Amino acid sequence: MTLLRSSLRPYGTSIFTAMSQQAARQQAVNLAQGAPDFGPPAALLAAADEAVRRGGHQYSMSIGVPALRQAIAADLLRRYRRQVDPETEVTVTAGASEAIWCAALGLLEPGDEAIVLEPCYEQYPPAVTAAGATVRYVPCDFPEFRLDPERLVEAFNPRTRLVFLNTPWNPAGRVLREPELTLIGELAEKYDAYLVADETYEHLTFDGVAHLPVAEVAACRDRTVTISSVSKTFSATGWRVGWAVAPPALTAALRAVKQFVTFAPATPLQLATAVMVTDAPASGYYELLRAQYAQRRAVLRDYLQRTPLTLADNEGTFFLLGRCADDDVEYCTELIHSRGVAAIPASRFYADPQRGRGLVRFAFCKRLDTLRLAGDRLTAGG
């Protein structure tokens, strides 16, 4: 680590990597990493097979194959009546992570600040730091994780350049509401800041709670980079196909960085994604996806409610967050060794781990038999 740029050293090794490695060594059921233990839908695999057979083995355009950009634009028009130009407002990236980093590196100047809501996905802070900017955290409290307007107003200042939002929110499990987003948009306009909306769990909401795209809120519309991907929606975390949708000026900044990073994701996988994005709505895929995940959530939640953990509500994503009475890092380490189940110590989603002390995240993006095996281990012995 002594050769690593000093500003990035505090972030250390990803907690997902560390816990997954421990789980593998102990042959534990891995509910730590948000990666399904089942494959993508058959329609997506068939589209990939067809794309490989038909060619498409060379570089695509850096901004993505036209078919996928057009499919994303058509999907936004169909679902939200939002009209975007696939040539100037849609960019295909190597997963949502690349889009996050390209937005940070393309839009932040050294000395700028970026607001991040806590608990936060671990990609946001190092991306800000790598751009030479400073992270300003706005903590939200377990178990409701409601956004405190006073904390938010206090965080904004003339140095604020970006605000990172995640809705549905990993790991909090919340879906941000219109009044919250309106306030954020109004503050962004006041301070000439922009919003990076990570909406990779957009199709995974429950109990009648609907996902509200940040860019659909009037106060946010012209200032938002919206990010999504195939990873969660189509159970293809290893494909690394994502996208960013933004007004032309924001898109140009993101693309200026993106062309020098991966250049472009795998062409056949982009072509297959275009087919799936186009066909999924008519096939009823999204309704089936939500129903299947609602069942998985119910199974794991039933087991966790039989443990001493206090659970937060889950409105979206495929994670359940609970609070233990002990240090969460020690709890998760002991869980692997004594119960054979891996979870994430969620204090790692906070700049100051004490703010998240005792929080534990479990992923339910697993087969039902996997969840039942983990649940039996978690509840064995009463």
Image: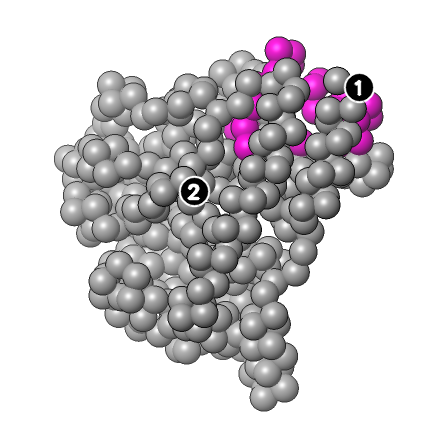
Q: Residue at x 34, y 52 (%)?
A: 226
Badge 1 crowding class, 10 Å Cα cut-off, few under 14, some 14 to 19, many 20 or more, is: few
Where residue 196 appears, as percent x and y from the top left, is: 35, 45
Where residue 359 appears, as percent x and y from the top left, is: 57, 21
Where residue 340 appears, as percent x and y from the top left, is: 80, 31
Q: In this view, does 356 lie above or below 42?
A: above
Residue 255 appears in view: yes
Query: Which range is magenta?
Result: 320-349
Q: Magenta segment: does it hold 54?
A: no
Report the side of 111 relative to 33 (left or right).
left
Amino acid type shown at disc 1: Gly
Which of the pair 52/146 is nearer the observer?
146
Q: Report helix, strand or loop for mark 1.
A: loop
Which of the pair 373/271 is nearer the observer?
373
Instruction: First in sequence, mark 2 or 1: give its number.
Output: 2
Report the side of 218 relative to 207 (left or right).
left
Badge 2 crowding class, 10 Å Cα cut-off, few under 14, some 14 to 19, many 20 or more, is: some
Count the numbered circles shown.
Answer: 2
Report the side of 218 relative to 60 (left or right).
left
Label 1 belongs to which residue?
Answer: 381
Q: In this view, does 144 lie above or below 125?
A: above
Label 2 belongs to which residue?
Answer: 206
Q: Magenta segment: does it hold 345?
A: yes
Residue 120 appears in view: no
